Amino acid sequence: MRNNFKEFEKKWQTRWDEEKAFHAADPGEKGSEKPKFYALVEFPYPSGSGMHVGHIKAYSGLEVVSRKRRMDGYNVLFPMGFDAFGLPTENTAVKTGVHPRIVTDNNIAKFTNQLRRVGFALDWDRVVDTTDEDYYRWTQWIFLKMFENGLAFRDTALVNYCPNCKVVLSNEDSQGGKCDICHSDIIQKSKDVWYLRITEYADKLLNGLADVDYLPNIKQQQVNWIGRSEGAFINFSLAEVDEKLRVYTTRPDTIFGVTFMVIAPEHPLIDKYADKIANMDAVIAYREECAKKTEFERTQLVKDKTGVCLDGISGINPITGKNIPIYIADYVMMGYGTGAIMAVPAHDSRDWDFARKFGIDIVEVIKGGDIEKEAYAGDGEMVNSGFLNGISVKAEAIKRATEELKKLGVGEGGVQYKMKDWAFNRQRYWGEPIPIVHCPHCGMVPVPYEELPLRLPPMEEFAPGVGGESPLARIDEFVNCTCPKCGAPAKRETDTMPQWAGSSWYYLRYIDPHNAEALADPAKLDYWLPVDWYNGGMEHVTRHMIYSRFWHHFLYDIGAVPTAEPYAKRTAQGLILGADGEKMSKSRGNGVDPNDVIDTYGADVLRTYVLFMGDYGAAAPWNESSVRGCKRFLDRVADLCDIAKGNGVTSALEVPFHKTIKKVTEDIEAMKFNTAIAAMMELLNKIYDCGTLTRDELLTFATLLCPFAPHLCEEINEILGGKSLLSLAKWPAYDEAKTVDASIEVAVQINGKVRTTVVLPLNCPKDEAIALAKADERIAAAIEGKTVIKEIAVPNKIVNIVVK
RNA sequence: GCCGGUGUGGCGGAAUCGGCAGACGCGACGGACUCAAAACCCGUUGGUAGCGAUAUCGUGCGGGUUCAAGUCCCGCCACCGGCACCA
């Protein structure tokens, strides 16, 4: 048979659609009695340029797993949707004058068409679009629940602001001092912003990791992101005024080594005691200098410590009673801990650098290093440390020190996180309006639940206002309203939510996408949750995943969902690089359009290639020749139709078939798609060597290959007389006993070097194996005249004879 | 700097528990088919030496354990990803 993919791919896609082949059965429906399998892939942002081959790889992994699980007898939910709010669409709208709604709809239509052309086995009745008002109604609902529970709050703060995009960014979106969207340098700006109190869930997010099956590096990244550290808060009195300066430290055991203190340039202590500080001019000048530095400069100058000593106020070590100077320096951040530290230059490299530069004493309290050369952070015996002297176990010293601080009432153990609260508002049009009313009498009042969705008002011009005001602020009919509580004239919040909002709960909406009464029916949530397997990119492991886990934990706490964790298992695919080995990008012009591949080679080839190109989790460059190799493979499979004759088993192929079924079955579950395909290629080569196979065997082959190349395999099934869809057929079973040959070729070594091979019966006993090996003339010759020291035989593997 | 990962032919990559390194695919070379080319088909393909059987070297580098190391241990190097003055 000719692999005439252009003719049959469309045919099978239509048939799957008509038969609703990939419909997921809700509880109570026929099919729901089967075990459920919820496979989730990160839904795309529908950009104007259409899908990327990277999307195809990202979806093909669980596409194959879920197709196989369906054939295994699972009730599979494999849905798709669109994360459509966000800046690129709005920027296109600003540039072209086309409304973001239209831009979004066009892009979604384009993506939908592409997804269908690839033949993904999706349940198309469950498509969600985060910009649909029936969707964002529930995004707003969750926000209000958080507001009700004190988790959404407003605060004036220095925020990361992108002057180019004109938006406030979260810490996550401005890493390295660069805007995540346009890569401009971000600046710090004082602004009233919305926060979600994600830090309150830090421990739950951390502890929850014990109950989920994420790839180890994914877990590790989340652990680092949350950044929990244990230590102590210690209150230092000030010598000149009745005031405490509170610091956070992970090393209370080094308290005897404190020779100075450092506070962040923004620390409130400075303004409070401005009149006591003799060198206030220098302090102010330094502070201004720091404010001017971008985050980037601040982190680049790590080794070059700067700072100013406060002249007029100093601290008192609560344990030793010694007077110590206080500096301001920008190596201490206001946003972590208390914005103040006790500096122990002998045992902290940053404090050491600073002390060296400013000529401050360095007092050793832990033996083991050379503090003249560098700070010593290792373990050792405590010295110069009063009651701590002689202790050499760090944990014990920390415990003793903390107890003492508590006894004296000057400190206590405490915990800190690197994770910060989530800056949750954006001053842009294309996002979910924050459903809050500002009333002059009642303050912030939530829009009543029954009034949701709070719709985005129609608009012609979407550019942000000067000074970074939301465009919504220009629409009087939207802004002016009455207070839902007291009826007085009031103003609406005009900021919108960040793009991460809609994607934080979309997997819940797939479960019940058309529900008008709730975000999803509890019975359905009970049935489908948690997501059994979630696959996506590494770049979303810290932001999107942490955000959505946070929302889910919250929803669990208010009884809206039945599980604490949303995702039982998480994996990640590797990037597809350009043919030049570089990341695909428009500017490099090394991108590949999946449409072109489908046009030239067919969807089955595209699907097979993205999974065959290498380790699924690793990056690999695109290679057009290898794509042709996959085409050749599928063509040769199609040609089997011409040689398949009769039924039953071909004896020479029986073991290879059982071996391959086993290999493919196991490899799919382990996401080792490349070796699964290689195994089928090997089997194909064996079939051609053999020159014949039966129609039953061809059907088995097609069934195995079906998750990868479903169009071709449906076609083969039809040619073989199959009436029902192969995609819904039963997954082939294998007989363990038939996965091994009756005899095995075993290597024979002399002194660890392979000299020959002998064919031995399966599980041949050691003695016999050695005897048979020795009977080989080459081995006999090698042993001749030498003393045999040792004989090793590992059944079915190897024989090694050690001689002298 | 810290955390995680990777390093194997010309290339992408295989290799359960330590047991024949290089599966599978690409490319290359040779052949067949063709007026010719493409496609398809057959064969060879880690390096070195040899007509050959074969020998010898070979999984980033240096040591070690073992009958046997890509795999385990110790010490390095390079690259990739994440975080980064986090007290």
Image: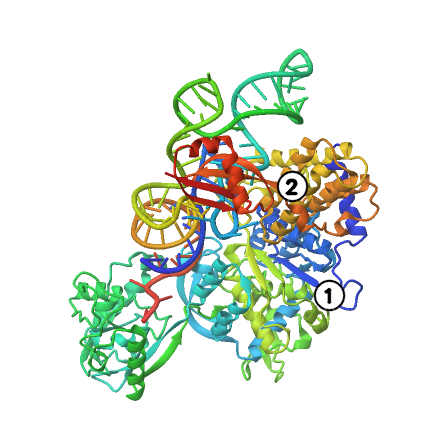
Subunit under mark 1: A
Residue A453, given in percent of the width and then of the height, sits at 66, 70
Q: Is residue A731 above or below residue A398?
A: above
Q: How many marks?
A: 2
Is residue A497 something that shows in the picture?
no
Quarter of the rendering containing residue A677? top right
In what element is the residue under mark 1? loop
Q: Amino acid at mark 1?
A: His
The numbered mark 2 sits on a residue in which chain? A
| Residue, disc 2 | A680
Q: Mark 1 = which residue?
A: A514
Q: Residues within 10 Å of mark 2 (few under 14, many from 20)?
A: many
In the image, residue A249 above or below residue B24 = below
Mark 2: which amino acid?
Answer: Met
Nearer to the camera, A371 or B70: B70
Please name whichever residue, A680 or A694, is drawn nearer the observer in this view of the structure. A694
- The lab-note entry on whether marks 2 and 1 share a chain reads yes
Q: Is residue A167 visible?
A: yes
Disc 2 is placed on an element classified as: helix
Residue drawn at x 63%, y 80% is A484
In front here: A742 or A423?
Answer: A742
Location of residue A341 in the rendering, given as x and y in whole percent from the top left corner: 29, 73
Task: Give the numbered dot on residue A92.
Answer: none
Q: Would you say the residues marked 2 and 1 are in contact, meaning their CB atoms lie under 8 Å apart?
A: no
